[in-house]
Image (spheres, helix red, strand yellow):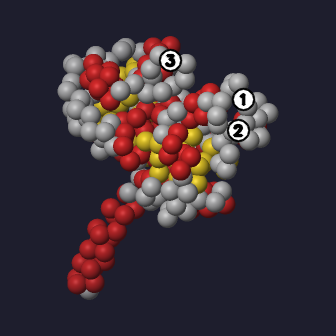
């Protein structure tokens, strides 16, 4: 009897890490509440400054995605790795920290910064499942007082393998996935001058993977959603939207939950594509 109990406990202990990792780089309120006071944990509110000032998770610093972009005719192209490193370091964020992001629930802004941090080589980056709503529903501590952290050292270790250029999009033999709405994809509504989509790309709006409670759908549901869109783990996938802000949360799901091995984000996105008159667009 003792031997049987021991074997059962051993099996459970071996399987637990598998279950714990089932949600990839998403972290639950319960999990975050255990580590948010840890000195090596940094929480980033990816919400607008006015929202941060109203209320934020205790200890969170504020990073707005638009502060990470270059000035120029093409919107939302990220700054150089060195410039980005200085911004994060000034906020007290190091590339060696455990970094947890959240926003108001869409996953757009936290996802964008998540991908940028992964591009800079940060290994331990998470997004809070359910975001601010889930944290408050869990009756966890919030504050209006801004968090002050000492400047940190941030050493970028650029991961070029997850960054796609226009040339990469043109040469792709995999799936180019447009995560905008169907109306944007079809050219019915868009802020771009030449409305439509990159020729040959397929459409799957990023919000399809998010539930009404702002948490991600189950692994099985998401796997089926992407399969129906023509994606599979063995294919290269290049993600884009209008400015690639909406691609980050999809990147997280594909790479850390569904185990896709070759996923890139086209940082120039549709803004860069349609601005080049030599590039065709479809509707």
Q: Residues within 10 Å of mark 1 (few under 14, many from 20)?
A: some
Check residue 82 in the rendering and tell me which mark sits there, or answer none: none
Q: Mark 3 to mark 2: distance in Å?
A: 22 Å
Q: Position of residue 272 (x, y in %)?
A: 57, 30
190 sits to left or right of 255: right
Q: Which residue is mark 1?
A: 194
Q: Is residue 179 above or below residue 255?
A: above
- At x 59%, y 49%, the residue is 176
Q: Nearer the viewer, residue 45 or 89?
A: 89
Q: Which residue is mark 3?
A: 72
Marks 3/2 in contact by CB < 8 Å: the verdict is no
Q: Position of residue 122 (x, y in %)?
A: 30, 40
- Residue 64 can be seen in this image: no
- At x 21%, y 19%, the residue is 150
28 sits to left or right of 181: left
Q: Quadrant of residue 213?
A: top right
Q: Which residue is mark 2?
A: 281
Q: Nearer the viewer, residue 3 or 52?
A: 52
């Amino acid at each position: 009897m003792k031997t049987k109990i021991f074997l059962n406990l051993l099996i459970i202990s071996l399987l637990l890490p598998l279950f714990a990792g089932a949600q990839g780089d998403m972290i639950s309120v319960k999990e975050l509440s255990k580590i948010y006071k840890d000195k090596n944990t940094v929480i980033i509110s990816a919400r607008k400054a006015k929202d941060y000032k109203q209320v934020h998770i205790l200890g969170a610093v504020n990073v707005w995605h638009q502060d990470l972009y270059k000035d120029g005719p093409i919107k939302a192209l990220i700054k150089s790795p060195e410039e980005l490193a200085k911004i994060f370091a000034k906020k007290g964020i190091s590339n060696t920290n455990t970094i947890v992001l959240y926003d108001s629930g869409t996953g757009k802004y936290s996802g964008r910064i998540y991908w940028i941090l992964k591009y800079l080589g940060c290994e331990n980056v998470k997004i809070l499942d359910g975001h601010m709503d889930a944290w408050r529903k869990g009756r966890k501590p919030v504050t209006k007082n801004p968090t002050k952290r000492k400047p940190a050292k941030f050493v970028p270790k650029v991961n070029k393998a997850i960054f796609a250029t226009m040339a990469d999009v043109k040469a792709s033999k995999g799936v180019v996935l447009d995560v905008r709405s169907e109306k944007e994809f079809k050219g019915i509504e868009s802020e771009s001058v030449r409305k439509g989509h990159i020729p040959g790309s397929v459409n799957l709006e990023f919000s399809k993977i998010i539930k009404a409670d702002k948490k991600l759908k189950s692994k099985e549901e998401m796997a089926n959603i992407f399969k129906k869109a023509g994606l599979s783990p063995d294919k290269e996938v290049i993600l884009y939207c209008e400015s690639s802000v909406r691609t980050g949360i999809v990147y997280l799901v594909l790479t850390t939950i569904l185990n896709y091995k070759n996923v890139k984000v086209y940082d120039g996105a549709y803004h860069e594509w349609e601005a080049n008159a030599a590039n065709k667009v479809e509707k």
